[in-house]
Amino acid sequence: MAPVRFGLIGYGAWGSHHARAISAISGATLAAIAECRPDGRRQAAADHPQTAIDEDFRELLRREALDVVAVVLPTHLHYEVAKEVLEAGHHLLLEKPMALTIDQCDKLNALARSRGRLLAVGHEFRVSALWGRVKELVENGSIGEPLYGIIELWRNPYRLGSDGWRYDIHRVGNWILEEPIHFFDLARWYFAGAGEPVSVFAQANGKQAEHPELQDNFTAMLTFPNGRYAVVSQTLAGWEHHQVVKITGTEGALWANWSGAMDRTFHPTFSLRRMGGGAVEEIPIAKMTGEVYELVDQAEMLVRAIREGAAPAVTGEDGRWSVAMCLKAQESVETGRPVAF
């Protein structure tokens, strides 16, 4: 079977990891990379000498042999570039957040449907051996009906990003869209059996009074039907990178944690424990886990989806929900009131 041919738009710090992941799987080939920065093109050519390197992403899109294109760019570029990818007839893997507005999300989903193309969104935690195992345990009823969850991140401040885009609120949209979006997606995924979120109440603050949009600390309570709820909390004022998921249910509880020197470490520590009937047990995790590994799992998932005509792990509709939850949370931060969906 011929390999699925990938194009990659963007070769910054995260784009280079996408390239490594695509190159690591047997069912795919990295056929082309588009990168506007000269130093990025030089690095891409050195890392992937058998791959075509383009300066303009439109040159890449004219390569008719491509099956799917991964877009790994600053947030404010997602919509326009993703739109052109779909219009060129390619399947699309779009890094989170899907777009800056709900209207943009709706337009991309409509375009993907009209062209018969897959639109997958880069919430790679859903293919994680660790966070995915939590989902399996919730789904198989190992803690009964989930009632409460907390997803917490303690980490270093964000890296600036190319040309400082991540600290430019006009390009990033808001900081809730930057990383808490992953945790909103996990909360919605874990509580899917309860129904879609009903409302969100959020609060945030930061160390720089002259830049209130740069929220070092953020917490939100996401409410689901029948009184179930999840807390999403993050601080950028800590150190290293430590993520915890705790879920309690009618018949037990789960506690998962992941720690590394940074989010992209290849040498993390992690564990998952379950309590049921008063006893606590360690749940084995099948393989190494972390974002750098999950990108490989994500690429493999997308290859299967393309070959089998199946839905990707995270669809455009899921991506739309993630953006909506973040935008409503930001509205709650600004108004000081709960906001309904």
Image: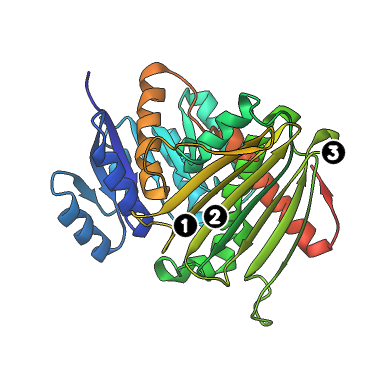
Where the C terminus falls, by quadrant?
A: top right
Please tell me how crowded label 3 is: few (under 14), some (14-19), or many (20+) other residues with Cα within 10 Å.
Answer: few
Quarter residue 179 falls in: bottom right
Lower position in the chain sequence, tag 1 or tag 3: 3
| Amino acid type, label 1 | Ser
Q: Which mark is residue 227?
A: 3
Tell me where residue 73 appears, x and y as whole percent. 42, 54
Please tell me how crowded label 1 is: few (under 14), some (14-19), or many (20+) other residues with Cα within 10 Å.
Answer: many
Residue 13 position (above or below residue 322): below
Numbered disc 2: secondary structure: strand
Numbered disc 3: secondary structure: helix
Tell us which disc is closer to us: 1 or 3: 1
Depth check, front residue: 52 or 135: 135
- Identified at 76% across, 51% down, the residue is 221
| Amino acid type, label 3 | Gly
- Residue 172 shows in the view: yes
Q: In this figure, which colouring scheme has been used for the structure?
A: rainbow
Q: Which mark is residue 243?
A: 2
Q: Which mark is residue 76?
A: none
- Identified at 69% across, 82% down, the residue is 209
Where the N terminus falls, by quadrant?
A: top left
Depth check, front residue: 62 or 122: 122
Tell me how far mark 1 sits from mark 3, CA to CA: 31 Å
Q: Which mark is residue 259?
A: 1
